[in-house]
Image: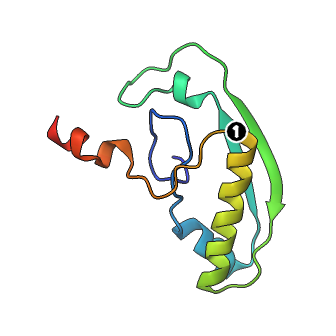
Amino acid sequence: MFAEGTANPRPGVLDFKLGAFATVARAGAVVVAVAIKGARSVLRVEEWFPRRGEISVAYLAEICPRGSDFTSAVALCDAARRAIIDELGEPDRAGEIPHHFSRAAAVR
């Protein structure tokens, strides 16, 4: 599962779900963001079997929360998301509705 809470066939990073980051901030733990390249072409949405291909995994620098409140959780989430976007070089798709929640997908 990706931090967006979904997988999407289009390149780019969607909004992250905040729950894990709120838990980390409350616990005073750190986040180690992980950028996964190639997963979209190997593990395709709505297909059961992986395709041949290369997947690379980059473990990024630790990100420490500034506090244990909601604002700190949001900042932690934003920092992790920005680090992953920078590593992947993919578009920032914040605010977009995931493909499987779109009107077109619902009509299928």
Residue found farthest to the right: 61
Q: Residue at x 74, y 53 (%)?
A: 83
Residue found farthest to the top: 52
Q: Check the image and report above or below for 60 versus 11.
A: below
Asked whether the viewer can see residue 102, the reply is yes
Please state, as top left, top right, bottom left or bottom right, where the C terminus lies in the image. top left
Disc 1 secondary structure class:
loop
Q: Residues within 10 Å of mark 1 (few under 14, many from 20)?
A: few
The front one of 42 and 104 is 104
Residue beneath label 1, please? 89
Q: Residue at x 53, y 29 (%)?
A: 40
Disc 1 marks a residue whose amino acid type is Gly
Q: Residue at x 51, y 51 (%)?
A: 14
- Image coordinates for residue 86, horizontal then vertical, percent: 74, 47
Residue 39, image quadrant: top right
- Image coordinates for residue 13, horizontal then vertical, percent: 56, 47
Q: Residue at x 19, y 43 (%)?
A: 106
In the picture provided, is 7 more to the left or to the right than 66?
A: left
- Image coordinates for residue 78, horizontal then vertical, percent: 65, 65
